[in-house]
Image: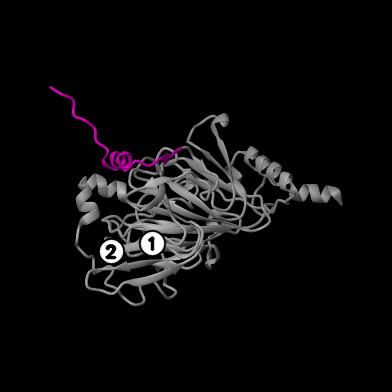
Amino acid sequence: MPDLERIDPYYDWQEREGIRAITGLFIEDLNTAELDPWARTGGKGAFVNLGLKIGHSKAAYIVEIPAGGSLNPMRHMFEEVVYVVSGRGATTVWTEGKEKQLIEWQEGSLLAIPLNAQFQHFNGSNAPARLLAYNNMPEVMMLFHNEEFIFNCPFAFTDRYAGQDDYFSGDGKLWDIKGRPVKALETSFVADARNLGLYQWKERGAGGFNVMFELADGVVPTHISQFPVGTYKKAHHHGHGDAGGGALLLILGGVGFSLVWPPGVKDAEIQQLIWKQNSLFVAPSSWYHQHFNTGATPARYLALRGGGGLRYGARGQQWGGADVSEDDGGWQIEYEREDPRVHQIFEAELAKHGAVCQMSDFSPFCTAEKETAAAR
């Protein structure tokens, strides 16, 4: 009796596309990542396969549009969010029988492609433009495992997008999230994610700010977080196992580092990732991660998460515990519970940059006030 072969439709499809896949935990700068000619898109590209995957439901790739050129028109049965890493240009989006809508973008823009709408990216500058695309293609491939259906289905989801004039314009709609101390912005386009207004999320520590996104009525979860100069966020993970999902974290501004480690590891296995604007790194599913600002400006990142969205889900399902202490059944390590060496690492990194720790009101291990008093 033969063994039943295990098939992975998404990663099999990746191999057939004939472009490289970037692995590891970290890409220092998306602008300098090496890319290959990609026939499907008409530009250059590379798959982003960082870490231990980010839950077998989400995926990412980098694509480059040649100077003054365009990519091929496309449509697909998976949801996709696009961040403009560099360049300026425009995207046309349309459905059959409707006029094309033009969305102009620049470095820092965030665009959600409506499910199975037709679209095409254009570069309006005399230098290449790079985009980072994040999608739920793996789970769609797993469900249908039919490439022709995924890329060539004519069905239009007019309940989501029917060519509305204001679909990619306006300020969006802000929502409270019942039972959570965060807010969600419902939109399909953010002109400049690097300067978007955020809202306080004190539960995550150190005076941080955040906004969750509901993009194009989809289930690809994303958010932006920011934390002040001389501070760091509390460590947490995103749930245990593949279902919880991990996250890709794209630095929108600032310099610093992050620590990532799997549960129960020895100290030597904790990894430190030094980042700057346009760095991308992974917090693999169930791994702890913690972010530290060592620069002179607030640090901001875009989180492209595994798991599901905010609006669609089982009634009565509880939100995750990313901002709830492990002592209370959540996924977060409070400052007073962290290993004191974490703060020592932070202060050592601050010293390298000539920066001052601002954690005296948050961390019991902060020595900044003691050193200031001693100097007096």
Checking the image for residue 117, the label placed there is 2
Label 2 close to label 1 by CB (< 8 Å): no
Q: Residue at horizontal 47%, vertical 59%?
A: 67
The quarter of the displayed image where residue 214 is located? bottom left
The furthest residue to the right: 376
The furthest residue to the bottom: 165
- Residue topped by disc 1: 121
One can see residue 330 in this view: no
Residue 290 rendering spot, x and y as whole percentages:
55, 45
Pointer 2 local density, CA inside 10 Å: few below 14, some 14–19, many at least 20: many
- Judged left or right of residue 297, residue 151 is left
Secondary structure type for disc 1? strand
- What's the residue type where badge 2 is placed? Ala
- Judged left or right of residue 125, residue 345 is right
* Residue 15 part of the magenta segment: yes
One can see residue 122 in this view: yes
Q: Residue at horizontal 38%, vertical 42%?
A: 19
Residue 85 rendering spot, x and y as whole percentages:
50, 56
- How far apart marks 2 and 1 lie (CA) works out to 13 Å
In front: 165, or 296?
A: 165
Secondary structure type for disc 2? loop
Span shown in magenta: 1-23
In front: 115, or 219?
A: 115
Q: Residue at horizontal 40%, vertical 40%?
A: 20
